[in-house]
Image (spheres, rainbow, N blue to C red):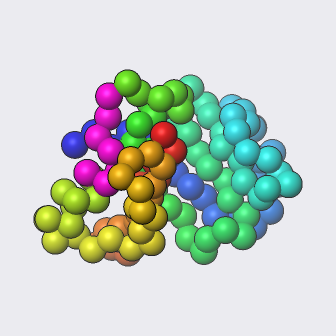
Amino acid sequence: MNVGCFSISLAVKDLAVSQAFYEKLGFTVYAGELAHRFLIMKNGDTNIGLFQGMFEHNIMTFNPGWDQHAQALSSFRDVRQIAEQLTAQGIELRQQQLKNERGPGSFAVTDPDGNTILFDQHV
């Protein structure tokens, strides 16, 4: 199952301080704004999201329909199909936003160690 673009979404205390730190590691801002309290940063094919005050813990994020450069894929497994497959395998879905038959949608799951995994489709 291809789940799309992968990134780690970090819950940060001070967005500007975190931005400066990750820039020292070679990351550059790709999307987002300080005023909106989030930044998406890239270093080659590696993506990180910095989020201030949006959630408590770090989250692994998959974006079905995107490649590692957030470019839309011509063919991909829709987030609703992924949700259906995981549910059939006994995995409980949380925070479901899957109202439409296609297009943007999201849901989260929790792995056996309590880590949150977000499936967040934008296309």
Q: Is residue 61 visible?
A: no
Residue 76: say if magenta. Answer: yes
Asked if residue 1 is among those painted magenta in the image, a careful observer would answer no
Q: Write down the region rendered in magenta.
A: 75-81
Give the farthest residue toward the left.
89
Out of 25 and 48, give the one closest to the viewer.
Answer: 48
Judge left or right: residue 3 versus residue 86: right
User: Is residue 36 positioned above or below 123 on the image?
Assistant: below
Quadrant housing the N terminus: top left
Above or below, 6 relative to 101: above
Query: Front-most of 7 and 90?
Result: 90
The residue at 85%/54% (across/down) is 35
Q: Kindly tell me whether residue 113 is visible in this rendering.
A: yes
Q: Identify the residue shown where x is 27% and y is 74%.
A: 92
Quarter occupied by residue 44: top right
Residue 25 % position (x, y):
68, 37
In the image, is 65 to the left or to the right of 85? right
Residue at position x 83%, y 51% in the image: 34
Residue 7 location, x and y as percent? 50, 46
Q: Position of residue 68 (x, y in %)?
A: 48, 31
Q: Give the image quarter of residue 30.
A: top right
Is residue 88 depicted above or below 34 in this figure?
A: below
Q: Total number of numbered labels?
A: 0
The location of residue 79, given as percent across then percent down, is 35, 50
Question: For residue 119, which quarter of the picture?
Answer: bottom left
Q: Which residue corresponds to the image point at 41% horizontal and 56% vertical from the top-left?
A: 100
